[in-house]
Amino acid sequence: MNDPSDPSAPIDVAPLFEPIAIRGLQLANRIVMAPMTRNFSPGGVPGDDVAAYYRRRAEGGTGLLITEGVGIDHPAALGDAGLGESNLPHLHGEAALTGWKRVVDAVHAAGGRIVPQLWHQGVMREPGTGPHPEAASLRPSGLWGPAGRMTSIDPAYAERVQAPTRPMTEREIQDVIDAYARSARHAREAGFDGIAIHGAHGYLIDTFLWDETNRRTDAWGGERRARARFAAEVVRAIRREAGESLPIFFRFSQWKQQDFKARLASTPQELEEVLGPIADAGVDVFDGSVRYFDRAEFEGSPLNLSGWARKLTGKLAMAIGGIGLDRGFYDSKRDGRAGGSDNVALLMKRFERAEFDLVAVGRALLNEPRWTEKLRHGHALPAFDEQRMKELY
């Protein structure tokens, strides 16, 4: 057993390098590259540089790569979300699909596995931006949410997008569900090894789950299980197109970019009401996005958010949140740095008690493509270079 109280004790990371099967996907280890927006795909098309970026992480021994958020086949999926995005990738059209096929082939040639994270920005997309500026940005109830606490959002952008708009129509809701399904089919045809869904951080799916942005009184709103209907229907549509062998990963979060203190659930029972319908629809792995993995989610238990998802749904779970670093993403942006951390011992303590099954590493892998290999062989894990991150983003 690892002893996190003794910093001089060697850390046994061998359990992280045990294989796992998820439906038809065989992974050599439990370490996953977390999705990270890069903005390096002009015209939405990933080029050879993107293929090389992912290939290097596969060569470094990481068991599974989850791509940056990839726009689904819907005109309002992508646009400016307050961060000046203009080169975000999408998953439709011959050029983009050919580009992603090259990415998949490069990762497979290096012995890796890769899944795309399907993304619709929803409320976060500024109207009049993106590949289809004429398309209306979509919100379940036309609401942005409460006054934001995310100080890194450009104030002028925040002022523009916070104005209420009209609610989504039934037709628009179905169109988006159909777009997720088409993109899942495109992913399968391109050779991806599964499908990941971005259902967190205040983007479209999350705004159906969150009571501050879903005030609907029809079948798409109401209590928690009803608000989960849209996410569940997206999962069902993806499952129909992906088939039975490809696993589905689902990212969710309590916090939103509009409100860091937001909560979908204040108790385990409330969380089960949110996740239960989504699990039943066909999700295989829940990715509970938190800023720090080693924090308890609810009073009276040490379990983190992913741990609770596993306990409540019986599905596999993936931990994330500052693994290998001493600061969360937004804290490191504020401070301009993030050092290497010995929190791997704390991670192993939770992993060994079966709190979660997979471990998602983001910025540490962005900073060092061979991070997984270094971890396995006991090499020192590097500090995070904020300037390097900016260059790579």
Image: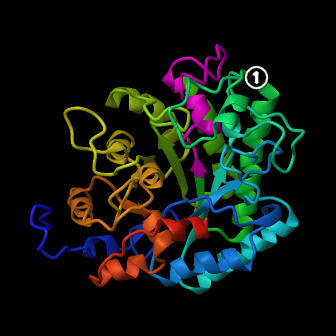
Q: Position of residue 324 (x, y in %)?
A: 34, 65
Q: Residues within 10 Å of mark 1 (few under 14, many from 20)?
A: some
Task: Give the quarter of the figure containing the N terminus.
Answer: bottom left
Query: What residue is rendered at 68% in x and 43% in y?
Result: 121
Q: Is residue 255 magenta?
A: no
Quadrant housing residue 258:
top right
Magenta segment's dominant SS is: loop
Query: Which residue is identified by label 1?
Result: 165
Magenta span of residues: 197-225
Of 188 and 267, the residue lying toward us: 267
Q: Is residue 212 magenta?
A: yes
Task: Give the quarter of the figure containing the C terminus.
Answer: bottom right
Q: Position of residue 261 (x, y in %)?
A: 43, 31
Q: Is residue 159 left or right of residue 384?
A: right
Q: How many marks?
A: 1
Q: Position of residue 359 (x, y in %)?
A: 38, 62
Q: Is residue 43 left or right of residue 71?
A: right
Query: What residue is rendered at 80% in x and 31% in y?
Result: 172
Query: What residue is rendered at 35% in x and 61% in y?
Result: 323
